[in-house]
Amino acid sequence: ATPLSIMVGTGEGARAGILIRSAEALETAHKLDTVVLDKTGTITAGRPALTDVRATAAIAGDDLLALVAAAEADSEHPLASAIVAGARDRGLTPAAASGFDSVTGGGVRATVDGHAVLVGTRRLLGDAGVDTGALDPIAADLSTEGKTPVLVAVDGRPAGVLAVADTVKADSTAAIAALHRLGLDVVMITGDNPRTAAAIARQVGIRRVLAEVLPEHKADEIRRLQAEGRRVGMVGDGINDAPALARADIGLAIGTGTDVAIEAADITLISGSLAGVVTAIRLSRATMRNIR
Ligand code: ADP
Ligand code: MG
């Protein structure tokens, strides 16, 4: 494209709240045929709230929640904040925890009131030798509702399941429909479990889902799609999205997300709305049309 058409395109983008880092990004965006969307914080608002506390017969619900909130107090994960806030809203005062440890994409462990508390995915508990048989059906039900189940073991025994749910951003569904109309394939990527991911995907009209992807594997999934001959745009907000944003043909960061994601991306969507992805691709198409 000519320097003038690039300037016009970049300026138009800026007015629409889309910061395009380079001429190359503006020139490449129209070639995308696949857009990969992170779930939490990208399709959804990223402000999850505690919705359910299902304790086993061995423990009272409030005691379970207080133990988990104590274990999550030092975690920076949005799920942890939701659980800590949920406990506070119910008037609970969590005890102090010691020996806090977090497993990326898995959960946390800590000692609370002399009890070993393990909180997170089915896989995390399973890897620690906990028999999750009593928790699995509860977790499955909650996932089908689009909630993220958080399994809990106390002293190696299953103690219950909490659920945390996030809301889909108001304009996500419309933006995804618009991407489909532009002829793009839309894929969801998430560290969350397949059932929850599928429920959210169904809600927003996405047919292809990559779930239970560990943070360090998100970039590999982008590479795999590129190996299929696809030109891939990746949209994300989190620290764990940064390598995938850098790997993609075009990385688009949610402006309300983390600085690390913004630095790794070619384009920043200031408002955080997925409508910006549609606008960026249209802008690139218009820019490239002008020069032919
Ligand atoms: P996402 O892509 O949804 O942001 P992450 O890779 O951060 O997912 O985490 C994947 C999954 O690991 C979460 O859906 C959750 O089940 C579990 N998990 C991660 N951190 C925590 C935590 N602090 N407490 C409980 N569960 C957690
Ligand atoms: Mg995210």
Image (cartoon, rainbow, N blue to C red):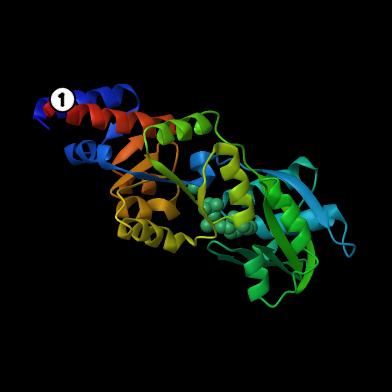
Relative to residue 217, is residue 15 drawn left or right? left
Helix or strand or loop: what does disc 1 sit on?
helix
User: Among all residues in the image, which is located at the extreme right?
Assistant: 57
Vertical placement of residue 126 versus 48, above or below:
below
Q: Residue at x 55, y 39 (%)?
A: 44
- List x then y, in percent, for residue 215: 46, 60
- List x then y, in percent, for residue 70: 71, 57
Relative to residue 70, is residue 234 drawn left or right? left
Q: Nearer the viewer, residue 92 or 266?
A: 266
Count of residue discs = 1
- List x then y, in percent, for residue 275: 42, 29
Q: Nearer the viewer, residue 117 or 234?
A: 234
Badge 1 density bin: few <14, some 14–19, many ≥20, Cα 10 Å: few
Q: Can the viewer see residue 193?
A: no
Relative to residue 142, is residue 250 drawn left or right? left
Quadrant in the picture for the N terminus: top left
User: Among all residues in the image, which is located at the extreme bottom?
Assistant: 129
Q: Residue at x 34, y 37 (%)?
A: 268
Q: Nearer the viewer, residue 55 or 44?
A: 44
Q: Can the viewer see residue 260?
A: yes
- List x then y, in percent, for residue 174: 50, 29
Q: Which residue is mark 1?
A: 290
Relative to residue 178, is residue 41 drawn left or right? right
Q: Residue at x 18, y 28 (%)?
A: 289
Vertical placement of residue 140 versus 146, above or below:
below
Q: Under 8 Å from ligand 2: the CB of mark 1? A: no
Q: Quadrant of residue 134?
A: bottom right
Quadrant in the picture for the C terminus: top left
Which amino acid does the dot numbered 1 rest on?
Answer: Asn
